[in-house]
Amino acid sequence: MKVEELKTTAAQVRRDIVRMVHGCQSGHPGGSLGCTDLVTALYFHEMKIDESKGADGFLNFSREAKGEDLFFLSNGHISPLFYSVLARRGYFDIKEMATFRKINSRLQGHPATHEHLPGIRIASGSLGQGLSVANGAAYAKKLRKEDRIVYVLMGDGEQQEGQIWEAAQFAPHYKLDNLVAIVDWNKQQIDGSTDKVMDNRDLKAKYEAFGWLTVDLLDGNDMQQVLDALAAAKALLGKGQPVVILMKTEMGAGVDFMMHTHKWHGTAPNDEQLAAALAQLPETLGDY
Amino acid sequence: MKKYTYTEKKDTRSGFGAGMAELGKSHPNVMALCADLVASLKLDAFIKENPDRFVQCGIAEANMIGVAAGLAIAGYVPYATTFANFGSGRVYDQIRQSVAYSGANVKIAVSHAGLTLGEDGATHQILEDLAMMRSMPEMTVINPCDYNQTKAATIALADHVGPAYLRFGRPVVPVFTDPNQEFVIGKAWMVNEGKDVTIVATGHLVWEAIQAGEILEQEGIDAEIINIHTIKPLDEEAILKSVEKTGCMVNAEEHQLNGGLGDAVCQLLSRKRPTPVEMVGVDNSFGESGTPAQLMEKYGLNAAAIVEKVKQVIARK
């Protein structure tokens, strides 16, 4: 997909996010909006996935992902973004977004496999676990000599979890050069800025010290830069080391009053705020 | 009382190692993961024959559980191994989210459970793991009693789709079960039929229950002994059928009284058939250093303790 089309898709995804969170009056719009460009680019441009469709017209989904690239969302609280991208990509009906976080829904507050929502391969939400799972999936692709890529997205607050660094030493040890991790470096977490809550210090130096190759993505909310960073990461694969993209984003990107603050990490907009947000986000593909 | 004898003593963990060695040959999708305890888990044979299907994870158990989940998603059948302490409490949340809730076909196979770990002391003597794993939805929990049963359970789990916790131990103990036994997950083993009391035992306490049965026989008490190797799902039918006949029960396990096999059985009986019960287990206490036999005696987890509880419970009938 061309960059203009990707921007069009991302605009609709942002509308979906805000509407979903408003619809149930709970959820995490900030990080979802910040990572919208990346996850849109992955699913609509970068990743090779099975394009075949079932009788219902939706994409066939195999949890094993043989022959496919695959993506894990470790910071599961940005689930509205994940759900919107999966629905818009064709894994399930966009109308199902209206059930987000409501009783008897497949769109749980945090992503889950339990209700068999197509597109989800692991539950996430309790932070710090996704990189380990991605390690296992990348290891499996190596064993099977499958030349495909495993992507995993993490938050920057999540980098405070000890398990991340257990996982960070595993991937280089086993030369998982088919693994691309992305850190959403928005410098915000629930209790405030990451610098104040628990300083991540120099994430790039940390990952390099652990044996990773790094790619700097200076503006993760600029679609062309996102595409360039993903291409740069891909070019570094196959050289015996895993790759991490350090992606600077703005939490709440696309909605002016949700930006430059941690306050919209886990807060839902009221009716008035929804209207103000939607006024900034063009309906490009039709609301659900 | 049916006669049980043994010609050798072996550790249950060696039964696990033997089971893995067989799976290495029979199941190409089985993998082994370990957190720096290969010799303790008796994985040498598996690794020697299948080096590409072994993943050394280092002293990083949380990551190991996640890696196992990732391998399971890809269609492998990973056995994530370490000491029971580090394969349960230390990684409870990883097992809960990445394995059980995610329906990942991961086997958590852990050694050195309970007091019989011995001299290393209470830091390593996990006595709460059955409670943790039993309370987790969709988790199968197995605690076999000797070398042969552990081997059979290890092999059976490879064809069981779903998360499981397999718990075994360090010391050498009598090998008294059939080497060619069929291990059916969730199906209790009738060790001895009797009419006066039901003794339900798991793990290392099964041999102690047999010893207790022989002592009781000399005193004119006819004990029915049931081995519950699968704590979850519990063989409710076997237990209910037995107490219908005997009218009282003693359960025995190398675990806290809180949350273990005893609690599972009492929950069943209180709902379906209220029955007097006495319990053999560790009573709200940590362990300590000592030899396995010394510890089992001090904490009341041997044949003598079972005999005493049997007399108490019969008096309550």
Image (spheres, rainbow, N blue to C red):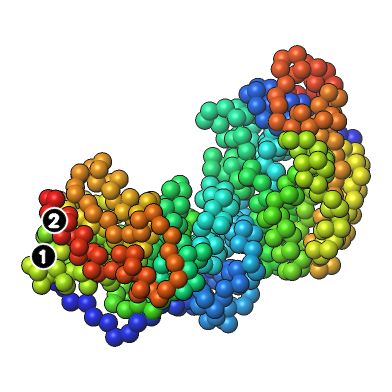
Nearest the viewer among A226 and B4 is: B4
Identify the residue shown where x is 31% and y is 65%: B301
Disc 2 vs disc 1: Cβ atoms closer than 8 Å? yes
> Picture coordinates of residue A60 (x, y %)?
63, 45
Instruction: For label 1, count other residues whose C-alpha is less than 10 Å away and answer few (under 14), some (14-19) or many (20+).
Output: many
- SS of the residue at dot 1? loop
Q: What residue type is labelled 2?
A: Ile
Q: Which of B152 and A196 is in front in this view?
A: A196
Q: Can residue B84 be seen in this view?
A: no
Q: Estimate the x, y position of residue A160 in percent, counting from the top left.
A: 73, 49
Percent coordinates x, y for residue A66 in the rendering? 66, 57
Task: Identify the residue at image location x=87%, y=58%.
Answer: A205
> Looking at the image, which residue is at 82% across and 55% down?
A244
Q: Answer few, some or many: residues within 10 Å of disc 2's Cα (few below 14, many 20 plus, some between 14 and 19).
A: some
Q: What residue do we see at 46% from left, 48% from top?
A: B136
| The disc label shown at residue A254, or none | none
Residue A119 appears left or right of B40 = right
Q: Is residue B121 above or below residue B260?
A: below
Instruction: Give the labeled residue for mark 1.
Output: B221
Distance of mark 2 from mark 1, alpha carbons? 10 Å
Q: Which residue does the numbered mark 2 point to in the structure image?
A: B314
